[in-house]
Image: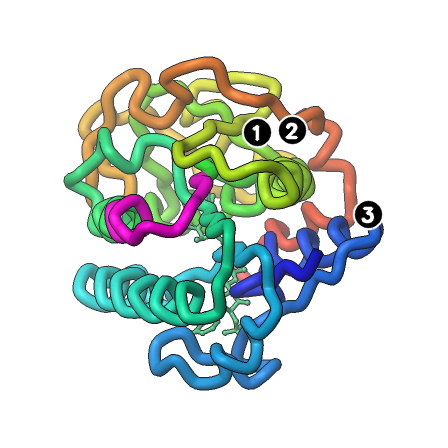
Amino acid sequence: MKLVIIGGTGLIGSKLVTTLREQGHEAVPASADTGVNTLTGEGLTEALQGASVVVDVSNSPSFEESAVMDFFTKSTRNLLKYAAAAGVGHYVALSVVGTERIPESPYLRAKNAQETLIKGAGIRYSIVHATQFFEFVKRIADEATDGTTVRLPPVLIQPMAADDVAQAVGRVAVGAPLNGTVEVAGPQQFRFDELIRQGLGARNDPREVVVDPHARYFGAELGERSLVPAGDARLGEIRFQEWLTQPAASGMRVTSR
Ligand SMILES: NC(=O)c1ccc[n+]([C@@H]2O[C@H](COP(=O)([O-])OP(=O)(O)OC[C@H]3O[C@@H](n4cnc5c(N)ncnc54)[C@H](OP(=O)(O)O)[C@@H]3O)[C@@H](O)[C@H]2O)c1
């Protein structure tokens, strides 16, 4: 079975390509490196030839409001058009738990628009809603930093390792289309501030993490359960403390503060 991984050179995409190849599938990464540009359609006809499954794990280079909406809508329209022309039977996309609950966030609004396009395209599909990646903890902290203080609301979060995300997406990609959404999450829930405090503390990051109920998360105020799965999520296995001891966690290390 040929699966084309859009964004197959990214954090999740590269792990997904490896996982699928280990299982004996023909997994083909598609990104600028392989001559594919989803915004223009360049390279998509060639890349999708003979593909049974398209998995979109690409991401917008910019999270700025109009740029991110432009990326996910243009790119998804192109992907759906070329996938239909190639006779692709299963369209899989990775999105975020809570996209429909946090419309104040420009990024999640764009992900929601991506999902709406997929649902209306007439190709059998599966959407995987994942919680925040452990690898994203430092980016979250940076976004919430004011001087030397990180302000976060005391809401629940159930983050997961990118390795577990790739496994979950891989299982969905080789299965029958769900024509629906499945939620995946990590094995533990944290208070948001506590997770970031632990993540930064493990890397000797001197920033102080404080609770602020009105602190915004990428532009949005959050409710207690905005970021955690609404239903029975499939759970990953890797725990945060275990992940912090792995070399992959070194990307969170602060070198210049
Ligand atoms: N971060 C989180 O906590 C989180 C949580 C849940 C879901 N997600 C979702 O997970 C997905 C993957 O995230 P990630 O962190 O793995 O992304 P990433 O590491 O930033 O990788 C993005 C990939 O997209 C490719 N790409 C960007 N623009 C492209 C274009 N115009 N044409 C073709 N390829 C393009 C990149 O290729 P180049 O490097 O060549 O540009 C790269 O391979 C995202 O859709 C995100 O919404 C993230």
Q: Report the span colored magenta.
A: 116-127
- Write the residue at 64% across / 27% down: 236
Q: Which residue is mark 2?
A: 240
Where residue 157 sits, quadrant-wise, is: top left
Q: Is mark 3 within 8 Å of ligand 1?
A: no
Q: Is residue 117 magenta?
A: yes
Query: In the rendering, which numbered label is found on residue 23?
Result: 3
Work out whether 144 lies above or below 213: below
**Amino acid type, label 3:** Gln
- Residue drawn at the location 58% of the way across and 33% of the way down: 160
Where residue 79 appears, as percent x and y from the top left, is 39, 66
Q: Where is residue 198? Give x, y as percent.
A: 57, 29
* Nearest to N terminus: mark 1 or mark 2: 1
Instruction: Give the CA separation, mark 1 to mark 3.
Output: 35 Å
Instruction: Report if the CB atoms under discs 1 and 3 are less than 8 Å apart.
Output: no
Q: Residue at x 67, y 52 (%)?
A: 16
